[in-house]
Image (cartoon, grey):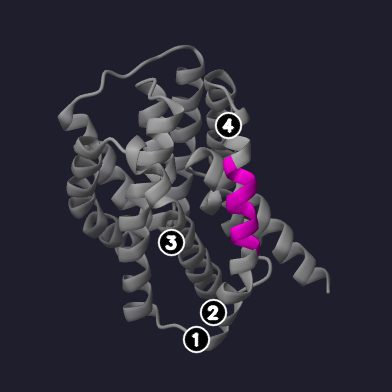
Amino acid sequence: METIVLFIIVILLASILQTSTGFGFSIMATPLLLLMFEPREAVQINLVLSLVISISLIRKIRKDIDVSVLRRLITGSLTGLPIGMIAFLMIDMTGLKVVVSILILALTFLLMLNFRIHKSKKRDLAAGGISGAFTTSIGMPGPPLLLYFAGTDTTKEKLRGTTLAFYLWIYAISLIVQVIFAGTTADIWKSSAAGLPIVLTGLFLGQVLFRWINQELFRKLMYILLIFTGMYLFLQQI
């Protein structure tokens, strides 16, 4: 019973966060799902439910998508995905996660001190590439995009729309790779199906919350999530 209640709370809060900001489902849900499921199950449930959120919102947010940036992010990710897989197979994951966590924390603090990045086509490609590499190596595509969009002062509407559209691509590819190379089980899909009503509730509440969040509060939420991600990755390894 306790596991069921925890599952409902985790999926609901993560869905609200993802819907209202365009990021955060994996950051919040994955660590807690790992307490309830085996790693493969936790990752695939996360991927399925994240895809459901992106598919459900894509028509509503399509006017907010920066299509040219999205195309470059996807193009960049095509290079990053295999690089991340090679890193996953050849590099010690403990050391990699420690380095990544320190970089995330350092860059977040720079952003909080008003360090800014000038957006360009090459940097869009690089952000997509790094996000793709993060997806296949540590399972978190969000932090590179979040850092990049925060550094370029992207509006909350453009950030949410473009990242959710990008996740539709990156999570679909990741799920296919997971199923092919790691396999899947009926329990994964049953648990994902059980999470659907909770996700739909989170979608509604997240949409309401999005209208209440102003740009300054949105930026603070980004910083909080980035610091949480960096600390989680670091503490996970020690």
Q: Earlier in the sequence, mark 3 or mark 1?
A: 3
Residue count near mark 2 (Cα–Cα under 10 Å), binned few <14, some 14–19, many ≥20: some
Q: Is residue 58 above or below residue 151?
A: below
Contact (Cβ within 8 Å) of mark 4 with mark 3: no
Residue with the mark numbered 4:
211
Bounds of the magenta span? Answer: 198-207
**Tag 1 secondary structure:** loop
Earlier-in-chain disc, 4 versus 1 = 1
Picture layout, residue 64 above or below residue 78:
above
Q: Residue at x 58, y 81 (%)?
A: 190
* Callout 4 amino acid: Arg
Please report whichever mark, 3 or 2, sits nearer to the chain's N-terminal start: 3
Vertical side of 144 occupied by 148: above or below: above
Q: Are marks 3 and 1 in contact (CB under 8 Å)?
A: no
Q: Mark 4 and mark 3: span between their CA atoms? A: 22 Å
Residue type at mark 1 is: Thr
Question: Is 202 contained in the magenta span?
Answer: yes
What count of labels does the image hold?
4
- Is label 2 in contact with label 1 (beta carbons under 8 Å)? yes
Instruction: For marks 3 and 2, give the one nearer the viewer.
Output: 3
Which mark, residue 51? 3
Neighbor class of circle 1 (other Cα within 10 Å; few <14, some 14-19, many 20+) is few
Label 3 amino acid? Leu
Q: Give the residue number, with chain letter if any, for mark 1.
A: 185
**Residue name at image x 23 percent, y 36 percent:** 69
In 3D space, how far apart are the residues under numbered discs 3 and 1 (Cα atoms)? 18 Å
